[in-house]
Amino acid sequence: MNEYAARVSEALAARYAHEPEYLQSVQEWLAMISPALDGDPRYEKLDLLTRMVEPERMFTFLVPWVDDKGVAHTQHGYRVQFNSAIGPYKGGLRFHPSVNPSVVKFLGFEQTYKNALTGLPIGGAAGGADFDPRGKSSREVMRFCQSFMQALYRYIGSDTDVPAGDIGVGSREIGYLYGMYKRLTSRAESSALTGKGLTYGGSLIRQEAAGFGTVYFLARMLEHQGETLEGKRIAVSGFGNMAWGVCRKAAELGGKVVTLSGPDGYVYDPDGVTTQEKFDFMLAMRSAGHDKVEEYADRFGVEFYAGKKPWWVPVDIAIPCAKENEIGVEDAVLLIANGVKYYVEAANMPATSEAMKLLRLSPRILTAGAKASGSGGVAVSALEMVQNSLRYSWTRQEVDWRLRGIMSSIYDASAAAAEQYGLGYDLIAGNDIASFKKISEAMMAQGL
Ligand code: GLU
């Protein structure tokens, strides 16, 4: 690691020893960008790295709400406004019991660098609450969203900070959040939130975007190897929005997703999740809110493996779509042993540091990181903001075509930066360096 980067890393570790996800994402990044720091004294002179690895500001607030039985609860809400060098803060909201300051800071950090190469003017942010939407009625979810927005509204806005969805926050929640924002501000400020419904300023393809984007990125990697998706078997973890988009776009391009997973285990569908009926069932399963993938096995008569991860299945391509650190060392060993050739992240930081090291060391596996291959969702969020400011909506084809172009240019920028720094075909380091350079240039231009 570069010497200045190592010092920043140590200082951060001393200060935030109790925030493991945040430290992990920053420390991995510092190692990746080190080749770009060597021999350039500007960064240290301005102490730029310190300002890049910590959020510019961060809010925490209490979210009280009453359940259907009349019992009062209090959740903890967060918004981390990480970096605004290239545009208003932008990033998702996560409602999940695991949400804490470390998780939102890691998400905000990753989001900043994920957003940088989309070509659209957006900074990075993340937020959410330790609310568990599982088993909650729609009325409870609405009341929670309204209370959450009563605290959040003063910090956001189309030119300040633009939240969107993430785990536990989909179009239903965005609707409730937006409704309350409008009530509190008296403004029909559509680009204050993205992921909106199609009847009030949402963009076509936004729901599909995260998964579609990852498959477009993968398609460029395959092309580089002289291959296509035709006939390829894909293992996917998760069964939410990202997984759904991956299944659909992969099927369209001739590939076949053969696994899905949930907190309860994984399903193996040798015919692939390739039909409309299966796509629709995934959506129904998600909105039922049981968080159990076994329902897919019951419905389509395929095998369900309780308590296991999908990496047991031999495939050509692995696309983690679930959560941070879902892939540990034993999973990485399985992936390698099962002959995976492409490891392409859709979820943020799905592998532990040790697992990632193993995957990157394996000479047969090509890897792409979520800050590149996972940026389709936020790219279409930014396109939603463009459409809102034009007061116009593009067609499905127009949005999809733009998304494809954005993913392709992120791929090109990552490959070019890797090449320029003598790192070969290291798309992860290439992407980290290219986005670092863009944001650092913007920060330096704007002064201390
Ligand atoms: N959490 C989402 C992401 O992946 C959404 C961000 C957004 O659309 O602003 O990147």
Image: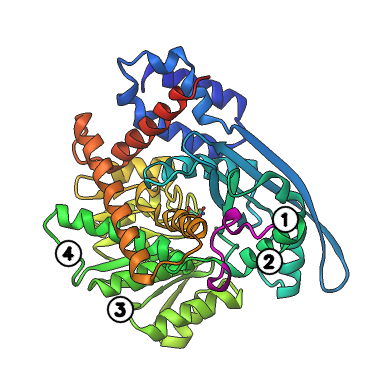
Q: Does 411 appear above or below 38?
A: below
User: Whole-Å distance between the Cαs marked 3 and 1?
Assistant: 44 Å
The numbered mark, 2 or 3, whose residue comes first in the sequence reads 2
| Residue for badge 2 | 176
| Residue for badge 3 | 270
Residue at (43% x, 20% y) in the render: 6
Do the CB atoms of the residues marked 1 and 2 lie less than 8 Å apart?
yes
- Quadrant of the rendered structure where residue 171 is? bottom right
Do the CB atoms of the residues marked 4 and 1 lie less than 8 Å apart?
no
Amino acid at circle 2: Tyr
Amino acid at circle 3: Pro
> Judging from the image, what secondary structure is the residue with disc 2 in?
helix
User: Whole-Å distance between the Cαs marked 2 and 3?
Assistant: 39 Å
| Residue for badge 4 | 228
Do the CB atoms of the residues marked 2 and 4 lie less than 8 Å apart?
no
Residue at (48% x, 85% y) in the render: 298
Amino acid at circle 1: Met
Check residue 149 in the rendering and tell me which mark sits there, or answer none: 1
The numbered mark, 3 or 4, whose residue comes first in the sequence reads 4
